[in-house]
Image (cartoon, grey):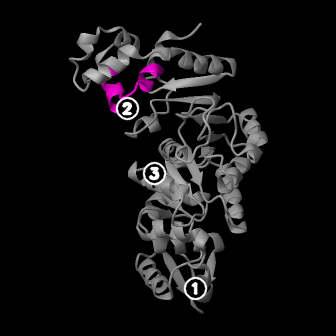
Amino acid sequence: MINENLLYNIALTQVSGISHKLVKQLLARYPSATDIFNERRDVLRTLEGLSKEKADNIKQYNDFKTIEAQIDFAVKHNIDIRFYTDDAYAYRLLECANHPLFYFCKGDTDLNTKRVISIVGTRANSEYGQWMTEKLVADLKSYSPVVISGMAYGIDTICHKASVKNNLLTVGVLAHGLDSIYPPENRILAKQMLESGGALLTEYFTNSKPERFNFPNRNRIVAGISDATIVIETNEKGGSMITAELAYSYKRGLLAVPGRVNDNKSSGCLKLIAANKAKVITGAADIANLLKWKRNGQSGKEEAVQSSLFMELDNDETLIYNLLKNHEQLQIDALYHLCPITKPEIANALLTMEIKNMIKRMPGMIYKLNN
């Protein structure tokens, strides 16, 4: 039996001329969408925001069978339809002004769990991008986050595969309906994600194709549904940069992996870092520090100290801090080689960190963290 309230809720979002904002205004005024459709035409015309034409569009709407078909498909295939007024709706999304009014979700992943991150990047990744994504996800296993990405070629696919391999719940946000998987090469991956407790999510009806204009809409969900977005590799244009800018606009964590300054695949990451929009990360521990996570079984006191230290560093200092943390100690020439910043910038950061008593300089221009 069709859920009448859900049927009318979705139908209201499909009425011509009824905007996202107007749907919310109407549902704040009436007990249910059913009451709105049953309201007298002359009363609707008197409501704020409803012109005569819009009121008539509500009364004349007659495509309920399309909505019924969507609900029937969802019931048949164990798909949840979550309207923005539902308790199970992802609360992080709800904090974003342009969140979808409803979405379809197949799978049991709790999107309101404590730790949710998004990982994005170029479709044409490098070997380094693949290595970095796989290592990052593997190391995140200690923190057990839900990992969100967009099921696209490249970094997205690598991220989902690595999550399945490391027993992390992973959610793919689609730019089309749940009756298909795009790219088709990821059908087996999608099945593996679901079988391992992950999920697939979309705001699009069945039979919706992966049209070009759907992807920016998909990206706002990827950015809004998580605590932070991590950009692995990207040039200065494309979907990953759109997602990054959205995450920044939502005041979510925005983190980026630095790369060589002459590598086009890292130019977007470096641009975000240079604009002070993204924090530099080189590993899972950096993410945990920034988001104030602790490892499974780790004490909160140690985590708080690490987070406090990390937040005191600017991007150049953070990059050097991470390198020294991963290598224990480095000679100045090695720092020049590994850091994607200029020698004067490195020297300035080292001096500042010495003054802060964060690093120690030893004979031979060797640097290490001052533990």
Above or below residue 74? Residue 231 is: below
Residue drawn where x is 44% and y is 51% of the image: 246
Q: Which residue is mark 1?
A: 336
Classify mark 2: residues with Cα within 10 Å, few (<14), some (14-19) or many (20+): some
- Mark 3 against mark 1, which lies toward the viewer? 3
> Amino acid under label 3?
Ala
- Which disc, if any, is residue 247? 3
Asked which secondary structure carries label 1, the reply is helix
> Amino acid under label 2?
His
Q: Which residue is mark 2?
A: 20
Residue drawn where x is 24% and y is 11% of the image: 42
- In x, y percent, where is residue 169? 66, 40
Distance between the alpha carbons at the discs numbered 3 and 1: 31 Å
Above or below residue 330? Residue 140 is: above
In contact (CB < 8 Å): disc 2 and disc 1: no
In contact (CB < 8 Å): disc 3 and disc 1: no
The span picked out in magenta is 10-27
Asked which secondary structure carries label 3, the reply is helix
Distance between the alpha carbons at the discs numbered 2 and 1: 51 Å
Magenta segment main secondary structure: helix
Closer to the chain start, of discs 3 and 1, is 3
Describe residue 228's horizontal placement relative to residue 295 as left or right. left
Classify mark 1: residues with Cα within 10 Å, few (<14), some (14-19) or many (20+): some
